[in-house]
Image (tube, coloured by chain):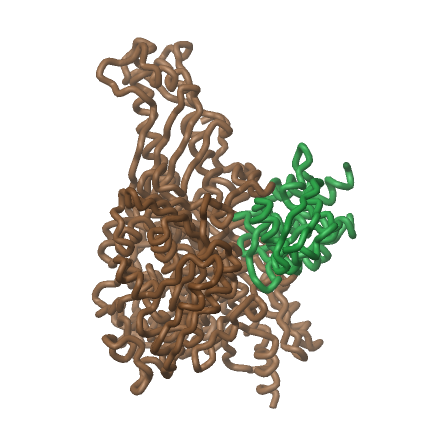
Amino acid sequence: MYPVSITVNGKKRRNQVDARLLLVHYLRDTLGLTGTNIGCDTSQCGSCTVLMDGKAVKSCTVLAVQADGAKVQTIEGLANGKMHPLQDAFWEKHGLQCGFCTPGMILTACDILQNNPKPSDAEIRAGLEGNLCRCTGYQNIVAAVKDAAGRMAKA
Amino acid sequence: MGSRIFGSPIKRREDPRLLTGQAKFTDDFSLPGMAYLAVVRSPYAHAKIKAIRTKKAAAMDGVLGVYTGQDMKDAGFGPIPCAWVVPGSDAKTPAYPPVAIDTVRYAGNAVAIVVATDRYIARDAADAVEVDYTPLPAVTDAEKATRKGAPQIHADVPNNQAFHWKVAGGDVDAAFKSADVVVKERIINQRLIPNAIECRSALAQYLTSTGEFTLWVTTQNPHIARFLLSLDTGTPEQKIRVIAPEVGGGFGSKLPHYPEDSMVVFASKMLGVPVKWTETRSENYRSTIHGRDHIQDVEMAAKKDGTIVGIRATVWANMGAYLSTASTGVPTILHGLMLSGAYDIKNIREDVYGVFTNTTPVDTYRGAGRPEATFLIERMVDLVAQKLKKDPADVRKKNFIPPFADGHTVATGLTYDSGNYIAAFDKALKMLDYTGFRKKQAELRKKGEYVGVGFSTYSEICGLGPSAVAGAVGFGGGLWESAVVRFHPSGKVVVLLGISPHGQGERTTFAQIVADQLGVAVEDVEVIHGDTERTPMGWGSYGSRSTPVGSGALMAAITKVRDKAKIVAAHLLEASADDIEYADGKFSVRGAPAKSKTIQDIALMANVAWNYPKGLEPGLEAEAFWDPPNFVYPFGSHIAVVRVDAETGEVRLERYLAVDDCGKVINPLIVSGQIHGGIAQGVAQALWEGAAYDDAGQLLTGSLMDYAVPKAEFFPNFELGETVTPTNVNPLGVKGIGETGTIASTAAVYNAVMDALTPFNVGKIDMPLTPEKVWRAISGARR
């Protein structure tokens, strides 16, 4: 077992973990933050995407010990008293159906908008290449990210 | 009615908890003392099990138990039942033990289960179980499996023929004799992997003291799951509670009852602790059902003027190694009966051979049988047009069933409810500017640029369905639906449903219906589903039935509530019930509108019953069960525009236009979302997706690394239009929309690629139309 100290959604958490424990299982099973989902085992689907030190990572491909000392943000930490503009936009634009890929989509979208606050449709579609959705055909997800960009520019 | 929320694109009430991570999917649940189950699976597609050595695994720290198929059998856990056996087809249903005994029949077939205190330990221990196999020859191709000398998969099923089903209408042979042209094609409707983004999961808590259990499971139909679990776990139905919490997509793949559902119940019973199993994606590719997989030999006969006079087809439908829950209904009832689609084709004959192979079982995947029918007919119509050198749009128009509002019986015996196919097609052609497109296409061809247009003008059967028909076609259950409408004393409403949506948004749309019909604010209505202990018996969500059938039950319950409220209102207003009028949540005395009571006033009085009609039951609540008189038949016209790069074979979908008609629309936002997602899945079959096995039965497309689930950048924005042709089948005039996109889009895209390739004269290319295949076809034709 190895000690880790990870700041998750602003709170410092200290735990003893197995070397092989994946960050996603640390979040879900150790901390009980089940908003981060697991949809595959080959890092294709992006359901487990979280922000680590501000960057979108697939938490199924990161070991908990690799996150030692890092700041991790999950979907649970996104709303700050009120919904994040991305959450509002996904709601408004019907950017989700079953909602399973949604936390990962939203955190990837955070990363996209941090780097490119006014993306085109094509840039959004390219930016979402690491996230799979089987319900929406992506159209309303793209619309939601675009709408969120507008909301964030105004804010 | 005053303000109507029916028809408004209101935001979904499902969303806030999904957007914030507060939603709970099955794998999100943990119980005190919970253990984790892992499955040891066969690496061979077909083998005898010689020995299973569990000692090493059992001795590992944290391992609670290791079990085999024989252990489950000894504990009274029986085979997984097939719940749809189509009559008149000489169907064979060999036993499907949840964990294999003696023989494995597909790669991924369970051979042992391991339970441990931690998911990682369970996985390690599963790898430590040693199994000796004697490999047997395998077969994966449905047609080859029926040939002499093919490996026999089940000892008591000669030639691996699970069933032979036939449908015939009209005089097919005479029609073919009278025809001017006959076109023939062998269509391979390839195997697909459903890929709901949430893999399956099941958590069982068995109480050994009472013999009851609760199962949290990724299912589309908790009541069916309970019914089937009572059969194979030996637990009486009243001692089973099945909960479908948030379910992360299904697309038919979470309809079946699966071996793992039974395994967790068994393990929990053996160990006296809650037991959870969660599938990995690679495991999902082998153990969750696949879809499609038809080989279709088809002939279509037509007159010179383009009139189609007959269809003859032989289909080999690959069922996989065992018959999964609803499997036999898919290539038969849901496919063969729909062979004439939107066209007036009077002579049809089809023979369907359901065949066992050494592959993962095949069952209901979005559209289930109807995409295979629609592709067949839409491709053949294009081939007829090609042969007659006619415009494929004109051939379609020539053959459409003329508009009808109250029933049209087709050659296979089905009676469609309502349709106006030409209106939808004309609208789609206009959206495209078809004439303009053909001009542009010709100009581009001169420049060496290849664009193509493809049509798919479909009608499909859904809203399953009348229970008497379900019984007649061998479905092992009813297909009615149920609803409870309950007023609380405060005037707020709770609705309990037998359906079990998993992304389709009925918590919102059904609240919209209640709000309008009972005159309450939509925010005052809560809709609950997915728990057999809270909701009335119902048959679940599949076959685009939740809205057309579920809303029928809801309307029946609403009517009962309103009728009762009227009696209470009459009492409170000191009038005769016959003189009470209802509008917008208010009951008033005819001719004296000032004398009125709101539904909230009545709800309070009905709940406290202080001043109440004599003999009337207290409470304002009604339960209703509703059996639809017919299926519903949504329809529409889809058009794809593609560009093919002749140098690389790459196909780019440039435009996609869809005009769908699902009757009256409750929430346009939700309907358009269903259409978008459906289109994406169908386009994916045409261009990217296909499950592939090698001859030994190894799944070559064994993970998301190898199986091309499409990404955002593969698609343009879809352009949607609509026509509205209500149905008389249910009170609200609504039809299902969950599957139309998938049913229609594969053929539209395929036909578009073939249209783009016309100058190359390439002949047939099997789906998916990957760049390599298209490039090979072009370069082969050039040579």
Q: Dividing the picture into quarters, in which one does residue B111 lie?
A: bottom left
Residue B590 visible to the viewer:
no
Q: Is residue B138 left or right of residue B15?
A: left
Camera-side residue of B222 and B515: B222
Residue B663 in the image: above or below residue B439: above
Q: Is residue B438 left or right of residue B230?
A: right
**Number of callouts in the render?**
0
Q: Quadrant of the C terminus of chain B?
A: bottom right
Camera-side residue of B105 and B763: B105
**Where residue B87 sits in the image (x, y, percent)?**
22, 63
Residue drawn at x 66%, y 75% is B645
**Where residue B681 sits in the image (x, y, percent)?**
52, 60
Residue drawn at x 31%, y 73% is B102
Chain that the image shows in brown: B
Camera-side residue of B559 and B108: B108
Rendered shade, chain A = green
Q: Is residue B496 left or right of residue B78?
A: right
Residue A9 visible to the viewer:
yes
Q: Dividing the picture into quarters, in which one does residue B233 lie?
A: bottom left
**Where residue B651 sits in the image (x, y, percent)?**
62, 71
Q: Is residue A70 left or right of residue B104?
A: right
Residue B64 in the image: above or below residue B684: above
Q: Quadrant of the N terminus of chain B?
A: top left
Residue drawn at x 42%, y 10% is B594
